[in-house]
Amino acid sequence: MHKLNRQTASVSQNRPVKVLQFGKGNFLRGFADWVIDILNEKTDFNGAVEIVQSISQGRDSVLNDQDGLYHVILNGIQHGQAFTETRLITSVIGTFSPSEDFKRFLETAENPHLQFIISNTTEAGIAFDSNDTTIESLAHSFPGKVTQLLYHRFRHFKGATDKGLIIIPCELIEKNGDVLKQTILQYIDLWNLPEAFKQWLLTANTFCNTLVDRIVPGFPKDTIRSVQEQIGFEDNQVVTAEPFHLWVIEATDAVRAAFPVEKTNLQVKFVKDLTPYRTRKVRILNGAHTALVPVAYLRGLRTVRESVEDTYAGDFIRKTISEEIIPTLDLPKEELQQFANDVIERFQNPFIRHELISIALNSISKYKVRVLPSVLEYNKRTGKLPERLLFSLAALICFYKGEVNREIIPLNDTPEILAFFKRAWATNNPVQVVKATLCNTALWGQDLTVIPGLEDKVLHYVLKYQEELSKDMPVNIL
């Protein structure tokens, strides 16, 4: 079996580096670099990616030994059918660590072809670190490093307005581009950098807010030998991912022209406001996960896939999405339904094992953020209460009893929330439990008992649950 490199794989492209990427993790390699690879194939983008590695310790060597090449393997369900696809990624030229070569890091800013910075440094990555007291040595934080890079570029090109960059962060925080820009401005002030640089940053550079969505399990360590035999190379940087992908970018027409993904069939959208798309993802994808977990778990199911394929739980979540969540959203109904169909297929993916108990982590706060807004909006728009979403809330209250059919549920939440439910269920009085839970503003940010009929509805389902669970039978209430 051949070692993977550009010679053995007969890859001879010599594209200019247009993208500097902060982060070498599985997600960016299985998502952004995969997109750019297709962009190179389908359009005249003709750009390479160079990766800035945040941690040294020799981690660059494996990808560099492969000349930046690796395979992305997509496994999942598409249009109701099993789907598998393998792609050799040629868009990455390699990776380096700025902590080992600060001078080289700054010199990347001198590249006249450079157009983009892409990042995924985790949710905690876009943060200000006051310990970065000087611009003369490598900053600890990601925003500090970007500030150093942009300032070097500003000086090298003497403030040329056409040498600004398009910054596309992929961290999972709201308004990630705006947050990154504001953090860089903090460093400009901390380091007393020139006002001319601040104005260049604000006028010549574009910071895009984004929403990204793809499950990327990463390196298939359990099956790597068979995978390598299948692809015919000793590839030690294989990335597995689901077929579904979505990249929503708040951007100007200039960004659309520079990053011509609309000439492909990729699910990359340029929008003026990504808020509706974030809301759609939180309420349909995340909300469906959260609403499904207690209902399915109390029924004896343990994974998302078996829950969706279960006649009762599967019907519950499909109707919850179509009848109670989609009516609360403002995007075109056809687009929402297609997204919902994609979500169900993602839940059914046989290559990804999603344990319900893992998703159940911090379920109370998740219900507050992901599901409760649908409950309130449905009530506001229709004047009615959403039966299934409140049934899920009742199931959640029963779930936090911590025991079902003499089996202990390994609850995982904050000590305060676990202590609250332990006290509430110690009364063994469902009426008191429901009232105490719904009026607890620390849980929901409001008193839910003031919503007409909500307490009675939830109590009805909790009592039904207690009756059904006492029979040691699968719960069938709705």
Image (cartoon, rainbow, N blue to C red):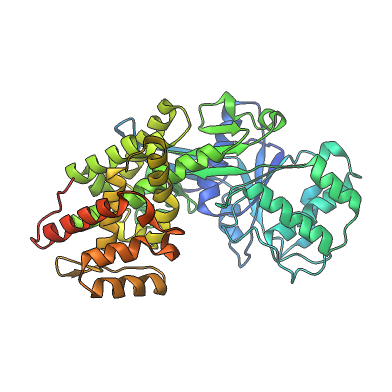
**Residue 232 in view here:** no
Residue ID at (77%, 42%):
205
Residue ID at (67%, 36%):
47
Percent position (x, y) of residue 431? 23, 64
| Res. 85 image quadrant | top left
| Res. 365 image quadrant | bottom left
Report how many numbered discs are placed on residues in the image: 0
Q: Quadrant of the C terminus?
A: top left
Q: Answer above or below: position of 419 versus 336.
A: below
Q: Answer above or below: position of 359 versus 131.
A: above
Quick one: 237 or 240, which is closer to the camera? 240
Q: Answer above or below: position of 111 versus 470.
A: above
Percent position (x, y) of residue 313? 22, 46
Quick one: 258 or 69, which is closer to the camera? 258
Q: Residue furthest top?
A: 263
**Residue 173 in view here:** yes
Residue ID at (37%, 35%):
382
Q: Tell whether 128 sits left or right of 213.
A: right
Residue ID at (13%, 54%):
474
Quick one: 232 or 455, which is closer to the camera? 455
Percent position (x, y) of residue 189? 83, 60
Q: Tell whether 428 sits left or right of 152.
A: left
Percent position (x, y) of residue 55? 62, 64
Q: Which residue lies furthest to the left in this view?
A: 471
Q: Tell whether 277 sits left or right of 204.
A: left
